[in-house]
Image (spheres, helix red, strand yellow):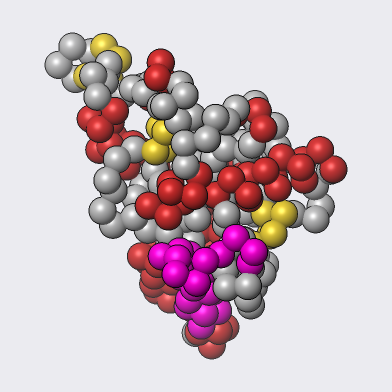
Amino acid sequence: MRPVERGSIPIDPKTNKKVSFSKYQAAKKQVVERIGHYCCYCEKPVTNVRDVEHILPKEHYPQLETIWHNFLISCRVCNDIKGRSLIRRKNFYWADVDNTFRIFEYHPLSADVKVNSMLSDTEKAIAKNTLDLIGLDRKPGHPQYKTTSADERWKERLDAVGTAKEAFADLQKNDTPEMRKQIVSNAQGRGFFSVWMTVFKDDPDMLNRFINAFPGTCTDCFDVVGKAIPRPGGRI
């Protein structure tokens, strides 16, 4: 999961004061501008952002319905699976406050997602909660995957792995600045930030290009060679 930096509450240029949203729908444009049109959970591109995602459901936390720091972007499938359950932030990792790139492993061939085996037992438990909350590991054969489901995140992620591996092979044959630039452009269009970071894990230049190319990626979550590090102020 790509860690993002939503930033502070937008300033109204007319009043030079922080924007107060009367309706959460009004925040959509600013949220997308800050962190891009990608789902903050599965990382797929969301070409038609319906509404902002409420981290803590407005049904249970009505006081947070129009609060900037409770907004992210989600695809329809992740939003539906996450649902409206009564949840607490402390029981999960979140892209806006933690280095969520550290919590999962993305298989470079199958595109399967699982909890990072290098985490501590406590961290693994929270990461597993997060994985289950959005069902990111669901695919045919998973006990909670329905054959009639509209959930094709697994397939889209697998397609992204194939595209990324082809791009990696192309770069080995023709390593030029132009090729690197083209690969980054392809990654932006395809989405699935973590897939590209996994396939190009041994190329610091490409890692940094991806980090800088996806809007709102929290750069404090990576060192100078593009490797994940604990997020300042976060839990992981």
Q: Residue furthest bottom?
A: 173
In-image side of 118 versus 158 (left or right): right
What residue do we see at 34% from left, 38% from top? 52
Task: State the count of labels.
Answer: 0
Q: Residue furthest right?
A: 121
Q: Which residues are magenta?
A: 142-166
Q: Quadrant of the C terminus?
A: top right
Q: Position of residue 127 (x, y in %)?
A: 69, 45
Q: Position of residue 49 (x, y in %)?
A: 28, 48
Q: Is residue 164 above or below residue 226?
A: below
Question: Was residue 145 drawn as part of the magenta stretch in this picture?
Answer: yes
Question: Was residue 226 drawn as part of the magenta stretch in this picture?
Answer: no
In-image side of 201 versus 95 (left or right): right
Q: Is residue 99 above or below residue 87?
A: below
17 and 148: which is toward the camera: 148
What residue do we see at 71% from left, 40% from top? 126
Q: Position of residue 73 (x, y in %)?
A: 39, 43
